[in-house]
Image: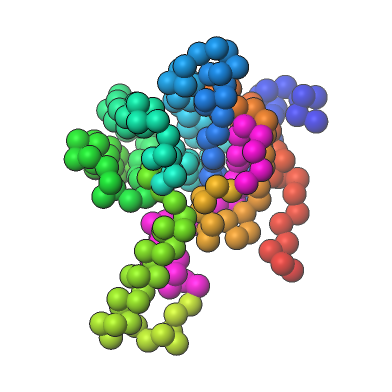
Amino acid sequence: MLNTISDTEKVKEIVRNTKLQHIAIIMDGNRRWAKSKLLPSVAGHKKGVEALRATLKACSKFNIKYLTVYAFSTENWNRPKEEVDFLMSLLAKTIISEVPEFKENDIRLRFIGDRNELNKDLTDVIEFGERETQNCKTLNFQIAFNYGSRMEITNAIKKIGQKIKNGLLDVNDITENTVSDNLYTNFLPDPDLLIRTGGEQRISNYLLWQCAYTEIYVTKTFWPDFDEKSLAKAIFEFNIRNRRFGK
């Protein structure tokens, strides 16, 4: 159906009809994209940054308020050391180079995940990016880095347990909101739409609590090839679904 209308009409329709606030993305397929082109894995990761840049622009164009992307999981430490080191370096370089454009386009950058295992140079750059964009409001952009949802939930349980131990919380007063308030994402609404690129059909330890009623959209497109048109298709699919929330 999308192919029957012009790009201009398509954009107008998506902006007019979507009720999306928050899109979460599992950016999968960088290495497979590189392999299919007989290139090293790092080439796929570099191209993936370009895809992310295009997606941010598209989110602004479609009036999406929140975008959260899965950049590095707690399991990704098991990859070859040279690839892990490259990803750390790529993140730092990307933040430094993109912050001026984020500010110009009113994009607020924040990170979710465990920073304790990251080196100081990288955490300094992360804090720089968050600090420089803290007054931006049009698009809230979260990068899940060294993130794992089970770890996040475990840490939330520990926080709640400590509050009970300190007499600040009664066990009978624990609600779903109590859990949500102790997650990394306590400043975000739950995702409306989860997009996974690369064709794999699993959540991969990503936003398990937050995605309880999130619509899931899987595309075979590798992340480096994901663009505005790809995002438009995902949003269009979201628009025609009937979200009942168990009703």
* 64 lies left or right of 18: left
Q: Is 69 located above or below residue 43 in the figure?
A: below
Quick check: can you spot residue 168? Answer: no
Q: Is 175 located above or below residue 104 in the figure?
A: below
Q: Position of residue 36 (x, y in %)?
A: 60, 17
Residue name at image x 39 percent, y 27 percent: 83
* 204 lies left or right of 116: right
Q: Which quarter shows the C terminus?
A: bottom right
Q: Quadrant of residue 159?
A: bottom left
User: Given the current orientation, which residue lies at the most extreme top position?
Assistant: 38
Q: Mostly what secondary structure, the magenta segment?
A: loop
Q: Position of residue 215 (x, y in %)?
A: 66, 50
Q: Position of residue 17 (x, y in %)?
A: 68, 43
Q: Which quarter shows the N terminus?
A: top right
Residue name at image x 64 percent, y 38 percent: 200
Most foreground residue, 52 or 208 = 208
Residue range corresponding to the magenta coloring:
176-202
Quick check: can you spot residue 3? Answer: yes
Q: Position of residue 223 (x, y in %)?
A: 56, 28
Q: Does the segment drawn in magenta span residue 196?
A: yes
